[in-house]
Amino acid sequence: MQILVILAHPANRSFNHAIVQAVIAELKQGGHQIAFHDLYAEGFDPILPAAEIPEEAAVPLEIERHCLEIARADGIIIVHPNWWGQPPAILKGWVDRVVRPGVAYRFVDGDQGEGIPIGLLKAKAVCVFNTSNTPPEREARAFGDPLETLWRNCVFGLCGVTTFYRRTFGVVVTSTIEQRRQWLAEAREVVQRYFPKENRA
Ligand SMILES: Cc1cc2nc3c(=O)[nH]c(=O)nc-3n(C[C@H](O)[C@H](O)[C@H](O)COP(=O)(O)O)c2cc1C
């Protein structure tokens, strides 16, 4: 399968980087084709210029490449920390610029954008791995777990992806090495479950 992997964390030694390494190792072992972007390392520009908003707009080559990759992906994996109940701004900008009309969704003819969009992504599954310092019960009770609504409903549900899995690893700041090892093993298991080994018989 063709799998798109997106990482948004500025520190190379972060647990998020460890997760993405585990994810990529598992995908490679499974014989998958990987398109990988470390948004901070690549200096991705998250600002959507006005000229890029119209569906028919010409977009820079870099964005065109991102659009091509998300459109042809059989699976998508996103890795990022919980920052204020949201993804880091660089990843929000990636959504603004790459999850575009005509690429990831469209409106029916005659609809100016007020109706229910039609999802265009062909990805069979999306996995989102998050890290957090808030215990999950508190994240749900006090804040309504906004990352779940955002990724499952607002982004990937709208774009037509029905198989969605999200896991938040935490509390990171007080975790032991053993706990983090277990989390990395779990991330690999999830990848294997949603993106099984390619049958290369
Ligand atoms: C700008 C910023 C905002 C943060 N906001 C939250 C938050 O709202 N909830 C939370 O649980 N942790 C928050 N954190 C903590 C990060 O989620 C935590 O440091 C990260 O998940 C740990 O993973 P890492 O070792 O890969 O950085 C925030 C951290 C930063 C730098």
Image: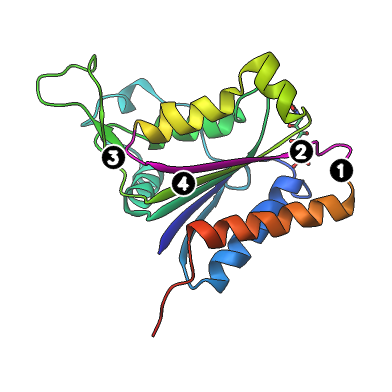
Q: Is residue 8 at least partly visible in the picture? A: no
In the picture provided, is 96 more to the left or to the right than 133? left
SS assignment at label 2: strand
Instruction: Name the residue rendered at 71%, 59% in the picture.
Output: 185
- Compare marks 2 and 3 and give the one earlier in the sequence: 3
Is label 4 in contact with label 2 (beta carbons under 8 Å)?
A: no
- Is 89 in front, or is 192? 192
Q: Which residues are magenta?
A: 159-175
> To which quarter of the image does residue 2 belong?
bottom left
SS assignment at label 4: strand
Three-letter amino acid code of the residue under disc 1: Ser
Q: In 3D space, how far apart are the residues under numbered discs 4 and 2 (Cα atoms)?
A: 20 Å
> Which residue is label 2 attached to?
170
Mark 3 vs mark 1, foreground winner is 1
- Compare marks 4 and 1 and give the one earlier in the sequence: 4
Q: In 3D space, how far apart are the residues under numbered discs 2 and 3 (Cα atoms)?
A: 34 Å
Q: In 3D space, how far apart are the residues under numbered discs 2 and 1 (Cα atoms)?
A: 7 Å
Q: Position of residue 48 (x, y in %)?
A: 42, 26
Residue at the bottom extreme, as displayed: 201
SS assignment at label 3: loop
Q: How many marks?
A: 4
- Is 188 in front, or is 102? 188
